[in-house]
Amino acid sequence: MTDISENTKTLGAVDVVIMAAGKGTRMNSKRPKVLHLLAGRALVQHVVDTAAQLSVRQVVVITGNGATEVEAALAHSAELGSGFKMDFVRQEPQLGTGHAVQQALPVLRDDGIVVVLSGDVPLIRADTLQHLIAACGGSRLALLTIDCADPTGYGRIVRQGEVVQAIVEQKDATDQQRAISEVYSGIMALPATHLKTWLARLDPQNAQGEYYLTDIVKFAVADGVPVVAHQITDPLQVAGVNSPLQLAELERAYQGRTALQLMAQGVRLADPARFDVRGQLHCAQDVFVDVNCVFAGLVTLGEGVTIGANCVISNAAIAAGAVIHPFTHIEGGKPGTQDFIEVGAGALVGPFARLRPGARLGAEVHVGNFVEVKNSTLARGAKANHLAYLGDATLGERVNYGAGSITANYDGAFKHRTVIEADAHIGSNCVLVAPVTIGAGATVGGGSTITKDTPPAALSVARARQVSIANWKRPTK
């Protein structure tokens, strides 16, 4: 299959304009509408990421409501070396879609194809935009359209035969025009030189008193520039978000589409309707995921991994054959850093376990119920099966770490490390006060508070002598 970005490059430079200035009144939120999250990413971030797949030259984001927040949220996209220049322009006040795109003109070059997108339409696909750009071909006005069973609220595509003559907005349409089911999606591609010429001719003589971007269609017709429509059948790609209900519906649709893709690859999902990916999830063969699991950041699941019900997993690599029991919470740091979590082949984790940033479990490690692991390494076969805390620790192979035991790693100013060498056994209810090393094969007696290194193969006990007082009476009132 030919690469999308390569096909796009053959058509010349592509610049993207994203309209993200709207208030989103129906969201009933102080947060700018385009910053509401879909699958863990801002709506507008989805649009920027799709544009990046086309190897665009420039992305211009038009902000207005909550401009400072939107610009700050997107600024990192360009910083991450996405390969395109990002500019922000502001639309103040908001006087319509045509007025919005007018604000982008000072930073747009004259030699490219401009693709106009909406920051609240997050699921547009890169291959669809590629076809739209090809339809433009550097000389035509290309509109992305779709046939709607209920076209209410959308601009209607008015044709004469197969030729597009105009887009008529709902409030300006006649009864005959409102019966048209083909509607404009809000997405178009056209030469920058034409766009600049036509935007200069806009006026607000319409029912809403706004500058309609759609009016440029009649200018194209008047100037003899061909207007073409690329019609799609997938409504998800052009679905916008204007209310919490629409956002929830789109979230579920997105997750359903993701679930279908994973199952087509051989992943077994107990219930595709109770499954959420809020980042990137990569699965090998024969992975099983039970209900109500959430995956965030970057997660990779090796062959035959089992994820129990109600788990939350972010930024982690889980190797083949590992079992993550129900209600386990794995919260790793950024990929490529030491905070990213690794779980070895055949490891057993949970239920009700918590792995925090920097946890690294070797093969066949057991981390059981109500065990918390942070910035610690457990070598092959190590076990911490019950009610324990391991922070800033290094455990050797086959270490057995008792119930109720903790590493006291913080002295009030600095963190210190605990080293437990291979084959050591730590009894229940122990406190290992770091920095401290437990020698290979050593045993620490239950209830001990260890403040000094222990020698290999020795039994170390550090607790007060038991005293029993006969005939002792409790105080009474």
Image (spheres, helix red, strand yellow):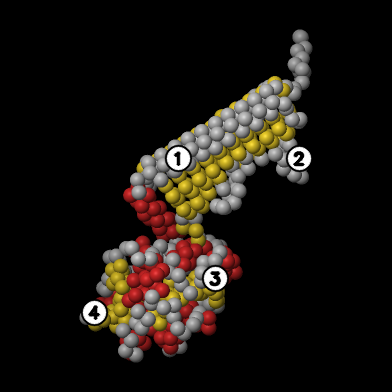
Give the labeled residue for mark 3.
65
* Camera-side residue of 285 and 71: 285
Find residue 411 and name its label. 2
Q: Type of residue at label 2?
A: Asp
Rendered location of residue 43, percent (x, y): 47, 63
Question: Which residue: 43% across, 64% down?
Answer: 122
**Compared with residue 63, is residue 304 higher up or lower down, i.e. above or below?**
above
Secondary structure, mark 2, is loop
Give the labeled residue for mark 1.
320
Q: Dot 4 surroundings within 10 Å: few (below 14), some, or many (20 or more)?
A: few
Residue sitting at the far top:
471
Task: Answer with mark 1 or mark 3, whichever residue precedes in sequence.
Answer: 3
Residue 121 image-quadrant placement: bottom left
* Camera-side residue of 81 and 464: 81
The quadrant of the picture occupied by the N terminus is bottom left
Q: Type of residue at label 3?
A: Asn
Secondary structure, mark 4, is loop
Task: Answer with mark 1 or mark 2, whichever residue precedes in sequence.
Answer: 1
C-beta proximity under 8 Å, tags 1 and 3: no
Secondary structure, mark 1, is loop
Give the labeled residue for mark 4.
162
Task: Answer with mark 3 or mark 4, whichever residue precedes in sequence.
Answer: 3
Find residue 55 and name its label. none
**Compared with residue 307, is residue 3 higher up or lower down, i.e. above or below?**
below
Q: Which of the two discs, 1 and 2, sits closer to the camera?
A: 1
Task: Answer with mark 2 or mark 3, whichever residue precedes in sequence.
Answer: 3
